[in-house]
Amino acid sequence: MKKFLPLIIIVLLWLSDQLKAQELNRIWSSESTLQVPESVLFSAYHNCLFVSNIVGNPADKDGVGVISILNQDGSIKELNWVTGLSAPKGMAVDSMYLYVSDIDELVVIDIKLQQIHNRIRRDGARFLNDVTINKKGSVFVSDTQTGRIYKLKDNSLNVWLEGPMLKGVNGLYCHNDDLIVGTENCILKVSMVDQSFEVLIENTTPVDGLVGDDNGGYYFSTWDGLLYHAVPDNTPVLLLDTSSENVNCADIGYDPTSRLIFVPTFFDNRVVAYRWGKL
C-alpha cells in the first residue's frame, strides 16, 4: 500500500484541482445603490464598467434612465454619469462612444464629454435590447418584440436580419466574421458576410446576456436568475441559479483577462462579479 501512496496523493490533488476548476466563485458585489441595472459592459480601453439603469419601467419613455460607471473592484465611480435616457438596456463601446439601446432608439454617448451625442430613432422598433459592435465598427441592435436585428449605417438603423428564427432575439456577440445571437430557445451563428446562419447551441432557456469566453465557448444568462456556460455541440452547464432568491441575472458582461463575469441583478440593484474556476 505504501508504494501506491504517492500515486494516490497525486490523483487526489488532481481531482481537487478539477473540482475547483468547476466552481463558480463570487469575487465582489457592488453597493445596492444602482437603480434596476439591466446591463453591464466591461471596457478595458476605458478601464471601467458601464452599467445601464432602467430606474423606472422597462418599456416606459419616462426619461429617468441613467448610465453608471463602476471601478473594476465593484466600487461605484459615478452613479449618475449620464442621465436623460428612458429604459437603457444593452450597450456596446468603442474608443469614443457608448452605444445604448433605449426602447425605440439607439442613444450614442460621447464618453469624453460625458453627454448624449445623438439619438437614432427607428420607426417600428418596439423593444430594442442588446447592442454589439464588430472590429470594423459596425453596430448591431436586437429588437426582442419584433424579431429583428438592426444595423447602424449613416445615422440610421436598418433592418439587417429578420425571420422566425429570431423569435425572442436578445443577446448579441460579435466573433470574427460571425454574429452570435441568443433567441428564445437557442444560440445562432450568423455570418456577417452573407447572413447565412446555423444553430450553434440548441435547447437553451431564453437568452438575455451573451458573451464569449475567449476560448471557443460562451456564457449566457436568463433574466430570471440563471447563468450558463455553453460550448458548441455540448449541453449548456448551469453555473448559477438565484431564481429562488428572486434575484435576476440580466445582460452580463465579461473581462477575458481576469475572467470575471459581471451579473446585473436588476431589481436587486447590484452588480455581482463571479469567476468560474481558478485564475
Image (spheres, grey):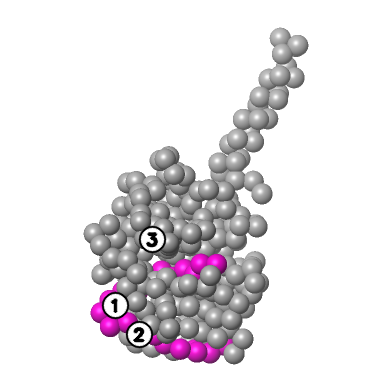
Whole-number angstrom distance, CA of label 3 to CA of label 2: 26 Å
Category of crowding for the residue at label 1, using alpha-carbon neighbours closer than 10 angstroms: few (below 14), some (14–19), many (at least 20): some
For the residues carrying marks 3 and 2, which lies nearer the camera in this image?
3
Q: Which contiguous range is marked in magenta?
A: 114-135
For badge 1, the amino acid type reads: Ala
Q: Are marks 3 and 1 in contact (CB under 8 Å)?
A: no
Q: Is residue 185 magenta?
A: no
Which mark sits nearer the N-terminus, 3 or 1? 1
Question: Where on the picture, by quarter, is residue 110?
Answer: bottom right
| Residue 121 circle label | 2
Question: In terms of secondary structure, where does tag 2 sit?
Answer: strand
Mark 1 highlights which residue?
125
Q: Are marks 1 and 2 in contact (CB under 8 Å)?
A: yes
Mark 3 highlights which residue?
194
For the residues carrying marks 3 and 1, which lies nearer the camera in this image?
3
| Left or right side of 220 for 1 | right
Category of crowding for the residue at label 2, using alpha-carbon neighbours closer than 10 angstroms: few (below 14), some (14–19), many (at least 20): some
Q: Is residue 117 magenta?
A: yes
For badge 3, the amino acid type reads: Asp
Give whichever of 151, 253 is nearer the camera: 151
Does residue 144 appear anywhere in the picture?
Answer: no
| Left or right side of 253 for 14 | right
Residue at the image position 43 percent from the left and 39 percent from the top: 234
Percent from the top left, x then y, of residue 172?
42, 63
Residue at the image position 57 percent from the left and 64 percent from the top: 29
Residue at the image position 71 percent from the left and 9 percent from the top: 1
For badge 2, the amino acid type reads: Arg
